[in-house]
């Protein structure tokens, strides 16, 4: 699994941070910061949930 984020698309909703805090963070502008591009298996479910719930579709996942 490989995760990518788009800061240009991010609207700062924070759903990713609350859903998968070990994979995503937010900067001072409340924009997404990716912590784990290739998260361990234990974080995959949370990362997929965060991606599917992102209102701006700023998170993409390859190789689910």
Image (tube, helix red, strand yellow):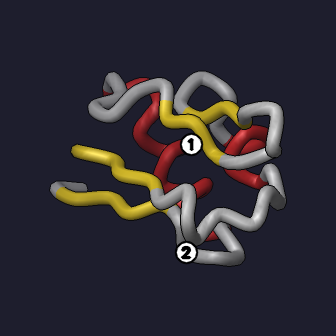
Q: Secondary structure at mark 2?
A: loop
Q: CA distance from mark 1 to mark 2?
A: 16 Å
Left/right of residue 6 with respect to residue 26 in the rendered view:
left
Mark 1 touches mark 2? (CB < 8 Å): no
Identify whether 19 is placed above or below 62: above
Q: x%, y% of residue 48? A: 47, 55
Left/right of residue 22 with respect to residue 36 in the rendered view:
right
Q: Quadrant of the C terminus?
A: bottom left
Q: Which mark is residue 57?
A: 2
Identify whether 41 is placed above or below 19: above
Identify whether 16 is placed above or below 60: above
Tag count in the figure?
A: 2
Q: Nearer the viewer, residue 44 or 55?
A: 55
Q: Badge 2: how crowded within 10 Å, few (<14), some, or many (20+)?
A: some
Q: Secondary structure at mark 1?
A: helix
Q: Nearer the viewer, residue 32 or 46?
A: 32
The answer to which of marks 1 and 2 sits earlier in the sequence is 1
Using the rendered view, name the quadrant where residue 52 is placed: bottom right
Q: Which residue is mark 1?
A: 46
Q: Quadrant of the N terminus?
A: top left
Q: x%, y% of residue 49? A: 58, 57
């Amino acid at each position: 699994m490989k995760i990518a984020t788009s800061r240009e698309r991010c609207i700062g909703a924070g759903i990713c941070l609350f859903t998968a805090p070990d994979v995503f963070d937010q900067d001072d502008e409340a924009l997404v910061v990716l912590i784990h591009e290739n998260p361990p298996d234990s974080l995959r479910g949370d990362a997929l949930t965060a991606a599917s719930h992102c209102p701006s579709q700023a998170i993409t996942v390859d190789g689910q």
